[in-house]
Image: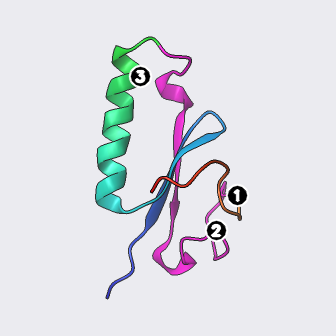
């Protein structure tokens, strides 16, 4: 079985979704951008960010992560 990259999506400093596979990430990312563009919320598109965890990181934030990563599990509840 091939390991996949995982993604965490944030709005400001709040984790909205964590440990998303590529397909789930793309769907949620596009959905969030549309929602923020259409609805009056406390967030702007610039507030949306994400981090990409390499497949070899184990997805738990403890593996070798890129610059700007937190190095631990993201705050907030699991997205599953």
Establish if 21 lies above or below 55: above
* Disc 3: CA contacts within 10 A as few (<14), some (14-19) or many (>=20): some
Disc with the residue nearer the chain's start (1 vs 3): 3
Residue where numbered disc 3 is placed = 36
Q: Hey, which residue is sitting farthest bottom in the picture?
A: 1
Disc with the residue nearer the chain's start (1 vs 2): 2
Residue where numbered disc 2 is placed = 61
Query: Which image quadrant: the N terminus?
Result: bottom left
In terms of secondary structure, where does tag 2 sit?
A: loop
Q: Magenta stretch? A: 41-69
Q: Position of residue 18 (x, y in %)?
A: 51, 55
The answer to whether the residue labelled 1 contacts the one labelled 2, judged by CB atoms less than 8 Å apart, is yes
Could you give the CA–CA distance between mark 3 and mark 2, rounded to whole angstroms? 28 Å
Left or right of 34 on screen, residue 74: right
* Disc 2: CA contacts within 10 A as few (<14), some (14-19) or many (>=20): some
Could you give the CA–CA distance between mark 1 and mark 3, rounded to whole angstroms? 25 Å
Q: Nearer the viewer, residue 2 or 18?
A: 18
Query: Which image quadrant: the C terminus?
Result: bottom left
Q: Quadrant of residue 10?
A: top right
Q: Position of residue 63 (x, y in %)?
A: 64, 77
Identified at 43% across, 69% down, the residue is 5
In terms of secondary structure, where does tag 3 sit?
A: helix
Residue where numbered disc 1 is placed = 70
């Amino acid at each position: 079985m091939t390991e996949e990259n995982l993604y965490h999506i944030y709005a400001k400093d709040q984790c909205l979704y964590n440990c998303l596979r590529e397909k789930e990430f793309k769907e949620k990312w596009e959905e969030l951008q549309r929602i923020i563009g259409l609805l009056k919320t406390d967030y702007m598109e610039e507030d949306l960010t994400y981090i990409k965890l390499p497949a070899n990181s184990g997805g738990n934030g403890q593996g070798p992560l890129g610059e700007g990563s937190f190095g631990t599990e993201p705050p907030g509840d699991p997205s599953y």
